[in-house]
Image (spheres, helix red, strand yellow):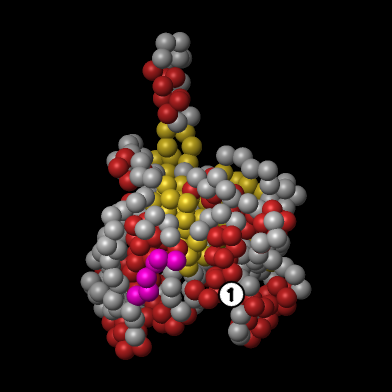
Amino acid sequence: LSFSWTPQLVSRIRHPRVVKVNSIEHETSSEAKKICAAVIVPGFLSGAGDFAALAKCLTAQGIPTVVVPMPVWHWLPCLGGRSMRPILERIDHTVKHLAANGGNVDAVPRFEYSLADCVGDFKDNPGGVAKVGGSDEVDDYPVVEPRGCFPAPTEPLQGRVALIGHSAGGWISRVYLSERPYGGKVYAGAKFVHSLVTLGTPHSEAPGPAFSGIRWADREGLLPQVRGLAVGGTGTLGIPASGQLTMNSYSFCIDSNEDLDGDGITPIDSALAMPGTLLPDKSSQEATSSPGKAEGEQSRQESNVDTLILPGVTHFPWSDVFGGGVVAPELTARHKEGMPWYGSPEIIDLWAPWLAKECGCNDFRSSDQFKSEGK
């Protein structure tokens, strides 16, 4: 893959971690039509409103995009490192409707979820530091069905869409794609998703219940029928001048005494660590079986995960949200002074072309092109 990205601004590293597979057993879903449309999964303790501008920008540039329709308070049952099944239900609802309606982001229905539902989920949702249900390990979670009414699509599947996961939304999206049971349910989202972009997602394992879901996801690489792009920002060092939140977050993600670099929340090494799957190159396989191929010569292999480093990018639009200056004063000040985040138009232009290519979106336009048209 190659794009005309500015070398001074962007560095790429390919295939950070891979898992070998002997065969691909998912031809049916991998051959499904690619729909040029995407679903954004908000990061921990953020909601749909925080990503409305990003979705609007991507849609205007040629990739119709919808955010999982959830407010911040829907995260409450997941506090303390507990099961992410409440969030997975919301991802499943949004992805399936978008895949069934052919990519019409305006036709994704809302789901029903009340404050009483939230209180019930908060009491019953398993795992976490309190070991609700008896354990903080995913495989030992009792089966607890999240509350809420999530109407199923009435139309048949039209194809597969893309997922964009911000922060924790990225590794939760990997759980959604898996064909293994999580908390008693197999979501098998790869049947409905062709590509995954993660923005500032912690992919590295770390001790404690809060990372039990990442440890669970890291047991396998991204399934071979899905392409992945792990995006991470740099420019905020894990030093006192960056603020206590950054220092605590980095040490939470990676057990290291060294000064770490990242986007202010996720260290770059963790953001790029999404494991992929080694896939045999078909052309090399054909060449191996043809006359004249040296005996014992190995076919080339590549991973289904790419990575992208964005220098000078922060994790979140801190100065645009209520309470940013209280939670992250140093990060808020830098954002207010002009430090972009993953959803800033000029930064979208650096990672969205990869997504547009995977989606088959031939009408993708950069933000400059869009502005020049007077839209």
Indicate whether 11 appears above or below 295. below
Q: 353 or 84: which is nearer to us?
A: 353
Q: Quadrant of residue 331?
A: bottom right
Q: 74 or 126: which is nearer to us?
A: 74
Residue 366 visible from this viewpoint: yes
What secondary structure characterizes most of the magenta part?
A: loop
Q: Quadrant of residue 327?
A: bottom right
Check disc 1 and report the residue beneath it.
248
Q: 80 or 290: which is nearer to us?
A: 290
Q: Which quarter of the rendering shows the C terminus?
A: bottom right
Residue 60 at what x, y percent from top left? Answer: 59, 60
Residue 255 at what x, y percent from top left? Answer: 54, 65
Residue 67 at what x, y percent from top left? Answer: 47, 68
Specify whether 188 is left or right of 345.
left
Specify whether 276 is left or right of 147.
right
Residue located at (53% from left, 76% from top): 49
Residue located at (44% from left, 69% from top): 68
Say what amino acid the circle numbered 1 marks. Answer: Asn
Residue located at (55% from left, 45% from top): 362
Q: Which quarter of the rendering shows the N terminus?
A: top right
Indicate whether 31 appears above or below 137. above
Q: Check disc 1: other Cα within 10 Å, few if <14, some if 14-19, many if 20+.
A: some
In this view, the residue farthest toward the top is: 292
| Residue 323 part of the magenta-drawn span | no
Residue located at (76% from left, 73% from top): 337
Indicate whether 12 appears above or below 312. above
Report the span colored magenta: 106-111
